[in-house]
Amino acid sequence: MNWTDRHWYALAVAVYGLATVYSTFLWRRGFRRHDWINYSLLGLGFLSHTWALLERGMSLQHCPIRNLYEASAFIGWSMLISYMLVGLWSRMRFLGVLVAPVQLALGVFALMPGLDTPSEPVVQTHRVMESVHAALALLAYGAFGLAAAGGGLFLMQVHDLKWRKLRAILSVLPPVQRLERVARHLAQVGWILLTLSLFLGSQLPPPPGTRLAGDPKVIWSAVLWVGYAVLLLWHWRGLSSRRFAWGLVGVFGFVLFTFWGTNLLSPLHHP
């Protein structure tokens, strides 16, 4: 059998499924030890996932983000590479219990029929800048996703401590202050990456018959940029850590539920 990039990605999604199943056991045990099994499973999926994107990119000769299958796979990959780096610190591997199901959901969606449509050829002159612009944006979404995962676990830890649950006492989750700090730093990194991406995108000439002003994806990106800027600034000015964590989860939920729709409506990104 001649394996294509989709086969390698499907294999990665299957491994993410195993990691998701194993994550349920971590929840039941209450995170009572540093777990390397889930991290290793996600690492195996990451290798297959990376090879799939490399094969697709080499065959297209540009960054593979031109349709919903490619964009979904790249968002998942960017979130996962952030986790693999953070997970080198054993005390942060707990994030994998939320990363695994998100990867599984993104993978199942990406592999749905009809999403992997042929992409239009890219103008050679602007290929590099366009690829960097798109890659920075998707890496930003990955950082936002990991920040939301940290925010979600922060909320769970606060809930357990409030109700004096034994799981909070016996778990190896970091203190709530550290969880909040990690989530905040990840959101800041994501916002910086998104800023760079939007700047590069503004320097690209739009395809014939399209324009930046009024494009749904451009408006959506601006709203997202302002949303995270306001959330970070508000937190700096005194917003409680609990509300900040809810904000991270809510804004990333907005990203997941609206990303593909705005892509389809955008003449710039879905010609």
Image (cartoon, rainbow, N blue to C red):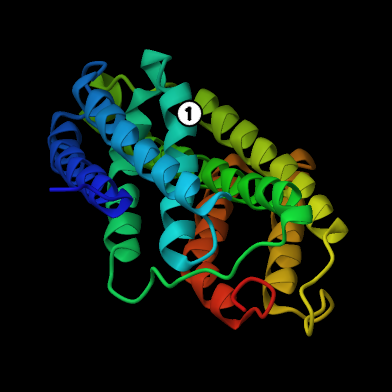
**Residue on which disc 1 sits:** 176
Q: Decide which of 234, 110 is in the foreground and name it.
A: 110
Q: Decide which of 127, 38 is in the foreground and name it.
A: 127
In the displayed structure image, the side of residue 147 where residue 83 appears, left or right: left
Q: Is residue 75 above or below residue 193?
A: below
In the displayed structure image, the side of residue 41 where residue 72 appears, left or right: right
For the point 32% across and 37% down, the residue is 160
Q: Decide which of 104, 4 is in the foreground and name it.
A: 4
**Tag 1: residue type?**
Val
Picture coordinates of residue 175, whole percent (x, y): 45, 22
Picture coordinates of residue 35, whole percent (x, y): 23, 20
Picture coordinates of residue 199, whole percent (x, y): 83, 52
Which quarter of the picture shows residue 19? top left
For the point 78% across and 48% down, the residue is 195
Q: Quadrant of the C terminus?
A: bottom right
Element class at badge 1: helix
Q: Is residue 245 above or below residue 214?
A: above
Q: Residues within 10 Å of mark 1 (few under 14, many from 20)?
A: many
For the point 24% across and 23% down, the residue is 40
In the displayed structure image, the side of residue 247 where residue 217 appears, left or right: right
